[in-house]
Amino acid sequence: MISVIIPAYNAEGHISQCLSAIAAQWQTLIPREVIVVSDGSTDQTVSIARELGARVFEIAHQGPAAARNFGAEQAQGDILIFTDADCRPDVGWVDHMTRPFDDPDVVGVMGRYKTNQTGLTARFAQAEFEDRYHRMVRLPRIDLIATYSAAFRRSVFLSEGGFNTSFARADNEDVEFSYRLARKGHKLVFTPEACVFHPHPARLTKYLRQKFGRAAWRMVVYSFHPTKAIKDTYTPLSLKIQIILAWPLLVLAVMAVIWPFWRLFFALTLLLFLSTCLPFIRNIWHLNYLVAVVSPLFLFLRSLAFGLGIVRGLYMVWRGRP
């Protein structure tokens, strides 16, 4: 049996699209259930989900990690598939997510994002994912499964304790759980055919705030799994170099304006930064050449946000949070 689990917090604006898309998935007679866990919602999320045939549970607001864990405990399926309330699974999503489990060694499966957005910031956000997917599709196993399109064997999910509920917001709790599974030798794989549509931030300021938060909470994850700060299957080395270079590049730009002596150092640092952008540009050029052309600017701004987020995250770890 297959259980699809959706945590939802005040999701009345999009839960119906999510559930309708999931209902359209069932082209086979495989027993299944759809579980919605309302994480303290105060709007019409619960009534909408019930009208659309989901098994609905209500818990006090504790964050998506706790909601997913609760849904897994209530699930009857051997395979748990997770997505988010603001995602709309594409045709064939469930079949593509479950097929890798024909291999008895596979414990977890990750799908991919799609978007119909046309704005430049949203298209760049999608290009980021496409760049990561280009990296992951060549690997026989991965060490990160994102919960927008994730599946696990229920027995292993429960035995390993599920998501860390000290991550009270939807940020990196899936990364921490994935690293935990990978550290114990469980096989995790990427299936690019399993897609969900999702709205990325349309405004640059919102996008940069999101990256700030991602970096901060990733530092918390690294406090549990320090070796992953060096290397994982999801993060390209070029991104880490860009983070290191971004703030010095900004400082050198200011110094070069004031003191001509620093212009050479600024130019060399800029060339080095641009060279780290080339793999990204190459991987996404065929998808959107305009995004590829402007990507160095986005990558620079992203790196500045990441750098600030890292500082914030180190402070959180020092203060003992979570």
Image (cartoon, helix red, strand yellow):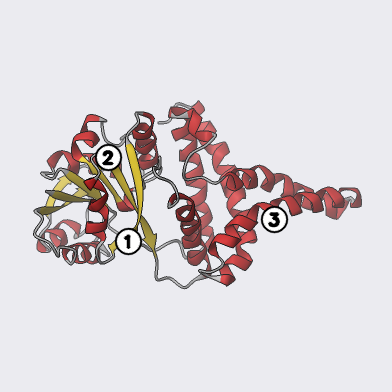
Residue 196 badge: 1
Pointer 3 or 2: first along the chain: 2
Q: In this view, does 281 lie above or below 2?
A: below
Residue 47 located left or right of residue 216: left
41 or 245, which is in the foreground? 245
How would you rate the neighbour count of disc 1 (Cα within 10 Å): few for under 14, some for 14-19, many for 20 or more? many
Percent of width and height locating residue 305:
58, 49
Which residue type carries mark 3? Leu
- Give amino acid for label 1: Val
- Residue type at the position of mark 2: Val
Q: Is residue 95 above or below residue 73?
A: below
Give the residue pinned by disc 3. 274
Q: Is residue 9 visible?
A: no
Mark 1 and mark 3 in contact? Answer it, CB < 8 Å: no
Look at the numbered discs 3 and 2 and tell me whether their residues touch, using CB distance below 8 Å.
Answer: no
Q: Does the residue at mark 2 contact the one at mark 1 (Cβ under 8 Å)?
A: no
